[in-house]
Image (cartoon, grey):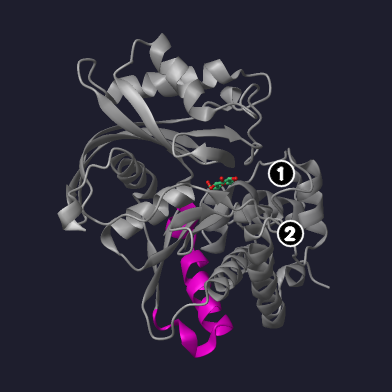
Amino acid sequence: MKVREKFIIADTQYQQIAVDFAAQMAFGIQGLPSCFKMLPSYLPRACGQERGQYLSLDFGGTNVRAVLVELAGCGRVNIVRSAARPIPVQLTGSAAQAEQLFDFIAELIAEVAQAEQAYALGHTFSFPVRQTDINSGVLVEWAKEFATAGVVGSDINSLLRKALAARGLVSVQPQVLLNDTVATLLAASYTDKNTIIGSICGTGHNTAFFDPTSNMIINLEAGNFDLLPVNEYDLLLDAVSNNPGRQKLEKMTAGRYLGELFRLAVQREDFAQPFALDTQLLAEIICGQDARFDQVEQELAVAIVQRAASLVAASYAGVLSYLNLEPGRHYSIAIDGSLYEKMPLYAAGIRATLDRLMAEQTEHIRIFAESRGSSVGGAVAAALASKSFCEEDI
Ligand code: BGC
């Protein structure tokens, strides 16, 4: 069997993945054993009339961003100021301490916040956090190869508050903690009330959905789905990762891993180092822009990306079937993340596979890029926490 063929999955298997995905959601919501954490966000959707200026902190996988956002109501948004920086790799390893990581974040916030002004802050923290309310929650486990010491088991906004206080930024008040998938759903629902799924296809992968029963957005931690047809390269990647046996769907679909999967499968001496081949290069190989790679290797890269997109589509088909939607009504899926925006074949692959898997039932399903998910979503969450909208507007 050619290496490329090992990355090809039949539609019948994608159908089965959708069925299993929905079943795992049903188990998780009932508190039965499930690969999903089903983490409650304590947040509803946006009503579109939230107003005011809020600070948004976006702590993702690759960068940290602090953004001052003005919500103007009627779905209108202005970005007032922002600052962003890549997270230094030495802060993500197990030798680094929580205090160092959160001081780096506080330093960035200081660039956006004015000392004399008070700010409500929405903290988008893109890792699995078990919350007890809108503003408190502990990190369950790291993902995306992070391993900073002293964060797992700690209350995330307490760590942030301490770091802000140490820099004299007491006027910045963290008021909400939310996952980036929740932020994406919130930001999207600010302008499109039909949004029922928020998803990230970037360095990591995850999905949240709006649960009408609890009137709350729920973070699936979908990257941990594991009823999947894996090949020998998936197993190899999992074995050398920081979290073997965990986040199997994420390892087959997310930017942190796709280049590595290709590197393991292609076995070239000039790319002997783990993680030496990133998604940027993978995109160039797919477009035939790197003469070092021949057509067979290009086709392999295409197969890896197409499988990733199709797996994500199958997971959305699973969520849609779990939600048991009203026929004929419009629903939207909002996606944020570099892979969705930039990787050739990825966005088109999601749409095409979802259409195939759901036959003629997809014309009412809008899939769109919500590229300001974490900044706007964090601000909308802070507005919801401070109840800064006119009741009569709803
Ligand atoms: C994390 C999720 C996050 C996703 C996308 C995953 O590794 O576990 O919490 O939503 O990455 O950033």
Find disc 1 in the rendering and name its residue: 270
Q: Is residue 9 above or below residue 335?
A: below
Q: Which mark is residue 220?
A: none
Three-letter amino acid code at the position of disc 1: Asp
What residue is drawn where x is 63% and y is 33%?
146
Q: Is residue 135 above or below residue 219?
A: above
Mark 2 beta carbon near ligand 1 (under 8 Å) = no
Magenta residues, start to end:
337-364
Q: Residue 145: give x, y in percent of width and height.
A: 65, 37
Quadrant of res 291: bottom right
Q: Is residue 335 above or below residue 324?
A: above
The single residue placed furthest to the bottom in the displayed view is 360
In the rendered image, residue 204 lying in the magenta stretch gets the answer no
Q: CA distance from mark 1 to mark 2?
A: 32 Å
Q: Nearer the viewer, mark 1 or mark 2?
A: 2
In the rendered image, residue 354 lying in the magenta stretch gets the answer yes
Q: 152 or 340, which lies in front?
A: 152
